[in-house]
Structures are given as C-alpha cells and as structure tokens.
Image: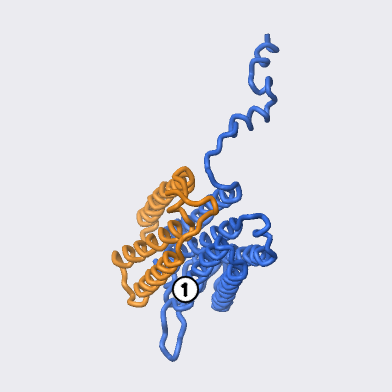
Chain colours: A blue, B orange
Amino acid sequence: MADQMSANRPQVQNGAWRSLVDDWSSDRQAFRVSWGKAMMWIFLLSDTFVFSLLLIGYMAVRLTTPQPWPDTSEVFALTVLGHEFPLLLIAIMTFILITSSGTMAMAVNFGYARNRRLAALFMLFTAILGASFVGLQAFEWTDLIQKGVRPWENPMGAPQFGSAFFMITGFHGLHVSIGVLYLLIVARKVLRGDYDRAGSYEPVEIAGLYWHFVDLVWVFIFAFFYLL
Amino acid sequence: MEHAPQGQQHPISLYLQVWGWLFVFSFLSYLVDYNDLQGVWRWTLVLLFMSVKAALIVTFFMHMFWERLSLVYAILLPPLCLLVLVGFLAIEGEYITLLRDLYLGR
C-alpha cells in the first residue's frame, strides 16, 4: 500500500531533482536576455533589498530616538575661500559619481561599437572617478571619527547617527570599491581583445549595470541621509 | 521596442542628454540645501529630484526602456513591497513617540 502510494509520486518516478529542474525550466525561457545579464539583474534586485533595509532601519531609529539628530548640512560643510558651503563635500562626491556614470555609459557604447581602446579608456576613467569617490569618503570618515563619532556614540546628539552613517556609507563605499576592481578587470579583458574573440561586448554592459546601480543607490542615500 | 541582437547600442547624444539632466537635478537638490529650504518644500523637492534622477538612471543608463516587459516587471515590481515595510515602521515610530509622551512625559 505504502509502496504503491509513493510509486505514484512524480519525484520517485523521475528522480527528485530531475523533476524539480524539469518543471522549473523545461526548455522555457522567461527572460530573453543572456544568463549573465539576468543574473546581474537578480543580484541587483537582492542588493536593492539590502540597501533598502539599511535605509528603512535608519528611518526607524531616526523616528524613535529621543536625542537630537545632527544637522548634516553643517556636519559635512566645507569652507572654501572663507565662505562656508553647506554639504559641499557630499555634493562634490555626488557630481563625481554622476560623471562616472556618464563615462561608463560611453564605455558601453564604445564597446558595442567595437572600439576597444576607447571602451577600455572610458572604463579606466570610470574606475579613477570611483576611486576618487572612495578617497573622498575616506576623508569624510576620518573627519567624523576625529569629531568623536563612532558606530555606538556621537557627541553631536543621537548615537544612531553614527551607526547609520558608518553602516550605510560603508556598505555603499564597499560597493564602489568592488566596482572599481570589477571595472579594471573587465577593462583589461577589453584591451586584450577577449570580447572581440568571444564576439560580444555584453560583459561591458553588465559591468555597466552594476556601476549604474551603485550610482542609483547613492541618489537615494544623498536624498535620505544627507538632504532630509 | 525591438533591438538588434548585438545588444544595447543607442545614440551617444541620448546618453549625453541624460547625463546633463542628472547634473541639473543634482545641482537643484544641492540648491535646496544651500538655500536652507525646510518643511514641506524641502521634502517635496528633494523627493521629486531623487525620483527623477533614479528614473533617468534606470530607464536609460540601465537600458530598462529597451528591455522586454517580463524583465522590467520582474525587477521593478518586487521593491514596491518595501513601501509596506516603510509604512509599518513609520506607524511604529509614531507609536513609540506617543508612548514616551504618555508614560515618560517629555
């Protein structure tokens, strides 16, 4: 009786894993893009959730802390030629990242135009801009650490400011740093002519997706953490 | 919209225009802070410029405009669930503040 019951289960007839794989794929293709691009998009979707949870957590602690929240425009102000510009450091970082997004878009375009040298050159520009972004972030972190801000304390008010700041900008900075490495690796492959031989420059576009995503996340961090 | 099997190749002028607009909107959001706007105007303008910039990046730089709808929906719809979480935690935040007023009498 029990044997007969289990013999009718499809898992037993075809092998458990086989039935799973057959049912989920069975020669159907949902996204008519290359697997590389689909995987990058799925990774970016999951990363969207990670960054969103960090930002929503920041919202929650900022709403509930009874201590005053520091004024970011003063904290990140820079004095240039005797005039104090609010939030100038962050504005510069924003412009650097947007510029790098533009150079990345150019690199993707030159890649598809089969212009090896210009594609690699623009990826290099992008990587340099990304590295300078991380450099400015290191400057920003040093400044705040010298002011006594730590992930667990903050002399300017709510200690949650410290944890949100280091967590959110740190995680984003890590993404930029990894992006710089990723771009350099792909740029090297472009120069070597790997993609001419493979017949497709799509890996450049996929690297571009990652880079634009990093810029996209910064748009939200800039608005929610620094401006609001 | 169909695209060549060769991939996402689009006129450079389009990218340059998007790039230009991103600069404009970033500058505008910086001006909000520079002019020290507060309250409703600050929130409205910052969120507006943020949404426009995000839309420009996803639509053109990340090529969503030219991708098939199956991919577009698979990627862009799930993050909307996060709005539910935002709503929950906003209500919770107000509630905690209310409790403090009631029991600790700020």
The residue depicted at 44 percent of the width and 46 percent of the height is B77
Farthest residue to the left: give it: B40
The residue depicted at 62 percent of the width and 70 percent of the height is A117
In the displayed structure, would residue A103 be above or below residue B99? below
Does the rendering let one see residue B41? yes
Q: Is residue A3 left or right of residue A79?
A: right
Q: Residue A164 in the image: x percent, y percent?
A: 51, 63
Does the rendering let one see residue A141? no
| Mark 1 element type | helix
The quadrant where residue A137 appears = bottom right
Q: Residue A174 in the image: x percent, y percent?
A: 60, 64
Name which residue type carries label 1: Phe
Q: Is residue B46 left or right of residue A39?
A: left
The number of numbered discs placed on residues in the rendered structure image is 1
Q: Residue A38 in the image: x percent, y percent?
A: 56, 48
**Disc 1 marks which residue?**
A95
- Mark 1 nearby-residue class (10 Å; few <14, some 14–19, many ≥20): some
Assign the C terminus of chain A to one quadrant of the image.
bottom left
Circle 1 marks a residue in which chain?
A: A
In the displayed structure, would residue A83 be above or below residue A103? below
Give whichever of A188, A137 is nearer the camera: A188
Give whichever of A221, B9 is nearer the camera: B9
The residue depicted at 43 percent of the width and 69 percent of the height is B16
In the displayed structure, would residue A155 be above or below residue A190? below
Q: Residue B4 in the image: x percent, y percent?
A: 50, 52
Assign the N terminus of chain A to one quadrant of the image.
top right
Farthest residue to the top: give it: A1
